[in-house]
Image (cartoon, helix red, strand yellow):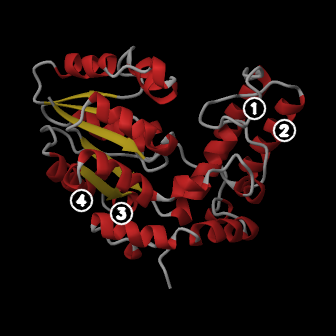
């Protein structure tokens, strides 16, 4: 079975790839969010079950059945790298299929932090950017991509791990698609040109403040939005979203698209300083990532050693 596993990172265009690109790969069976009823429980079992309760056979069987008569199968789940758990997820994937091609898309820490903060707020976060970066809700290891890549390379082999830059996807989707197909042995089906569009756009600063306030009210009312992606965010017995919270988020999202001015979509000065300090700590990690992958990251603005 020829298997491709797109394992992340989150906030690197995964939603657009899953909705607009992967379904158009020729002779490739594909599974991701919402495509198959068994997809989510099997992936969540791989991520969160105890060692004694994890068995690779069900997911392996799902991939085999999914492939059918196609020459290859592709599974996309960016939470695999978000929930790396010190390499446990990668080791479990290796138990499922040890000869898979692994695809990882990385993004400059200088820009991914704001998208991560946007995700944090949508999962109920109540802290400012600076407060979040200094709290236990933020895991700095998520930004050390070299450790993640090296883990997958050690398990699947260096030649089987394809690492690509999100910035290339933004700058030239066609070039990104061509490189993806060349390195994974796939091709696009004949038909209309693939147009990615933009999904899960980060909120503007006024909307950030509104959503954070809504989250603070929800916490005060003991009506939270617990998620395993941020296990310390809410007590486990307070896992219901309030109807008011959901209405507020819907209104904020709708109004946010009408906020004019690019300056309101850029981080404020204090937030920029806080994120720049954290991003700068990844310079050595990025230099090591270049050695592991051959990627040239400086041209995309990744922090690099002086």
Q: Dividing the image into 4 quarters, which one contains the N terminus?
A: top left
CA–CA distance in space, label 4 to label 2: 43 Å
Q: Which element type, helix, strand or loop, lies under badge 3?
A: helix
Q: Circles 4 and 2: CB distance less than 8 Å?
A: no
Q: Which element type, helix, strand or loop, lies under badge 1?
A: loop
Q: Nearer the viewer, residue 195 or 164?
A: 164
Q: Position of residue 204 (x, y in %)?
A: 67, 53
Q: Which element type, helix, strand or loop, lies under badge 4?
A: helix
Q: How many C-alpha atoms fall within 10 Å of the one at disc 3: few (<14), some, or many (≥20)?
A: few
CA–CA distance in space, label 3 to label 4: 9 Å
Q: Which residue is mark 3?
A: 171
The numbered mark, 4 or 1, whose residue comes first in the sequence reads 4
Q: Circles 3 and 4: CB distance less than 8 Å?
A: yes
Q: Which residue is mark 1?
A: 234
Q: Mark 4, mark 1: which one is toward the viewer?
A: 1
Q: How many C-alpha atoms fall within 10 Å of the one at disc 4: few (<14), some, or many (≥20)?
A: few
Taking the view exactly as shown, the residue that stands out farthest to the bottom is 306
Q: How many C-alpha atoms fall within 10 Å of the one at disc 1: few (<14), some, or many (≥20)?
A: many
Q: Circles 4 and 1: CB distance less than 8 Å?
A: no
Q: Circles 1 and 3: CB distance less than 8 Å?
A: no
CA–CA distance in space, label 2 to label 1: 12 Å
Q: Which residue is mark 2?
A: 216
Q: How many C-alpha atoms fall within 10 Å of the one at disc 2: few (<14), some, or many (≥20)?
A: some
CA–CA distance in space, label 1 to label 3: 38 Å
Q: Residue placed at 43% from the left, 21% from the top?
A: 54
Q: Which residue is mark 4?
A: 175
């Amino acid at each position: 079975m020829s298997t491709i596993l797109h394992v992340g990172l989150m906030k690197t265009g995964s939603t657009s790839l899953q909705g607009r690109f992967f379904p158009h790969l020729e002779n490739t069976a594909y599974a991701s969010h919402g495509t198959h009823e068994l997809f989510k429980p099997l992936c969540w079992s791989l991520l969160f079950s105890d060692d004694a309760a994890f068995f690779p056979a069900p997911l392996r069987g799902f991939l085999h059945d999914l492939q059918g008569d196609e020459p290859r199968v592709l599974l996309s789940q960016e939470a695999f790298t978000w929930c790396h758990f010190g390499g446990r997820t990668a080791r479990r994937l290796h138990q499922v299929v040890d000869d898979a091609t692994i695809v990882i898309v990385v993004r400059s820490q200088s820009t991914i932090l704001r998208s991560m903060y946007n995700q944090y707020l949508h999962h109920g976060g109540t802290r400012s950017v600076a407060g979040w970066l200094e709290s236990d809700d933020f895991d700095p290891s998520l930004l050390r991509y070299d450790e993640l890549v090296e883990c997958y390379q050690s398990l699947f082999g260096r030649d089987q791990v394809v690492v690509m830059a999100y910035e290339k996807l933004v700058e030239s989707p066609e070039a990104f698609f061509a490189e993806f197909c060349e390195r994974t042995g796939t091709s696009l089906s004949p038909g209309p040109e693939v147009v990615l569009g933009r999904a899960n756009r980060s909120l503007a600063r006024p909307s950030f403040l509104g959503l954070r306030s809504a989250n603070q009210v929800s916490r005060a009312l003991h009506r939270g939005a617990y998620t395993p992606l941020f296990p310390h965010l809410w007590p486990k017995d307070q896992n219901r979203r309030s109807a008011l919270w959901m209405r507020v988020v819907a209104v904020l999202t709708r109004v946010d698209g009408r906020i004019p001015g690019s300056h309101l979509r850029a981080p404020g000065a204090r937030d920029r300083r806080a994120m720049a300090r954290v991003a700068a700590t990844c310079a050595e990690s990025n230099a090591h990532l270049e050695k592991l992958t051959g990627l040239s990251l400086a041209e995309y603005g990744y922090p690099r050693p002086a």
